[in-house]
Image: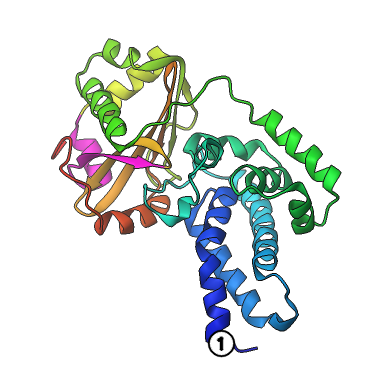
Amino acid sequence: MSVGVHEVEVFESGRARLEAIAYRLLGSATDAEDAVQDTFLRWQSAERDRIETPEAWLTKVLTNLCLNRLTSARAKRETYVGQWLPEPVFAGDRMLGPSDTVEQRESVSIAMLTLMERLSAKERVVYVLREAFGYSHGEIAEVLDLTEPNCQQIYRRAKQHLAADRRRVEVDATAARKIVEEFLAAALSGRTDSLVKMLADDAVSIGDGGGVVLSVKRPITGALRVARFLRTLFTPSEAKWDMVGGRPDLYAAVANGMPALVMVVGEQIVGVFTLDVTDGGIAAVHAQANPVKLARATRGWAGADHGEPLAGDW
């Protein structure tokens, strides 16, 4: 069936919401875009005059497409080279979706997206639709073709799997920049103790190079070990510059609601370090260096005002 102007407008009016759902479910902005486009193709070929509530229909189609992608992604990640991290998204990107509540903001943090990998596909869907978008258990049951009590049980199980030991500190752009400035100053100082003071005792560093960029294949844990690793990582060298294609400029930004240090060579982002700040210090440093997962961030970066670098030609 052909799609008229009205039908296109109906879909486009909900595109941002669909993208935000898909990103939380898949942890990849690129895959989320693909899932939403596939949803549009289903909408295009559907008997739309028989669809009473387009929003509910589109959500159900998108969710099922994401469920299929999650199953495929789990199989691929069994052979993924090194550690897997979500694709970072900068503040202002509609992919981040609603941010009115603590739960909505938390659901899109790199830390939570990483943590959600331990959930089953259905647990993830129930948790995301309930926590981030306020769907009732009855509505979620309709999306997943389950009973309402079953959805409630799945939700409780998901919450237990995601229970956090520490409270994450929320920061605005100004506070985020200050944190990144202090982190970078400590990292460039060459002094391990300066970094240790900023880290939680059980801090962890996780890097994703996707088998393309050299990265540590297992998480580094403990404040002292993480500090030593970061001190070495931020010591400039010709080998590091060759690996990223030149001497990068270092910027402060906010990605997924978290303070982020961005490495840029020319107009190409070559690394995003997101800092998971808790009341006990920086609990995690997530370093995304996989070029595939930085493509969208680079496109957005090119057209944005990101201010002056904290350090030029590092």
Location of the C terminus (image quadrant): top left
Q: Tell whether 34 sits left or right of 295.
A: right
Q: Is residue 213 above or below residue 45?
A: above
How many residues crowd around disc 1 within 10 Å: few (fewer than 14), some, or many (20 or more)?
A: few
Q: Quadrant of residue 195?
A: top left
Seen at 41% across and 39% down, the residue is 257
From where the camera sits, is residue 222 visible?
Answer: no
Seen at 19% across and 19% down, the residue is 189
All told, the count of numbered labels is 1
What is the x, y in percent for residue 178? 25, 28
Location of the N terminus (image quadrant): bottom right
Q: Is residue 273 above or below residue 18?
A: above
Seen at 24% across and 20% down, the residue is 186
Residue position for label 1: 4
The amino acid at mark 1 is Gly
Q: Is residue 250 above or below residue 43?
A: above
From where the camera sits, is residue 156 visible?
Answer: yes
Q: Which element carries disc 1, helix, strand or loop? A: loop
Q: Is residue 169 above or below residue 110?
A: above
Seen at 22% across and 43% down, the residue is 242
Is residue 63 highlighted in magenta? no
What is the x, y in percent for residue 107? 55, 40
What is the x, y in percent for residue 226? 39, 20
Residue stretch rendered in magenta on the structure: 236-255
What is the x, y in percent for residue 281? 40, 18
Q: Tell whether 142 sits left or right of 166.
A: right
Q: Tell whether 202 sits left or right of 78.
A: left
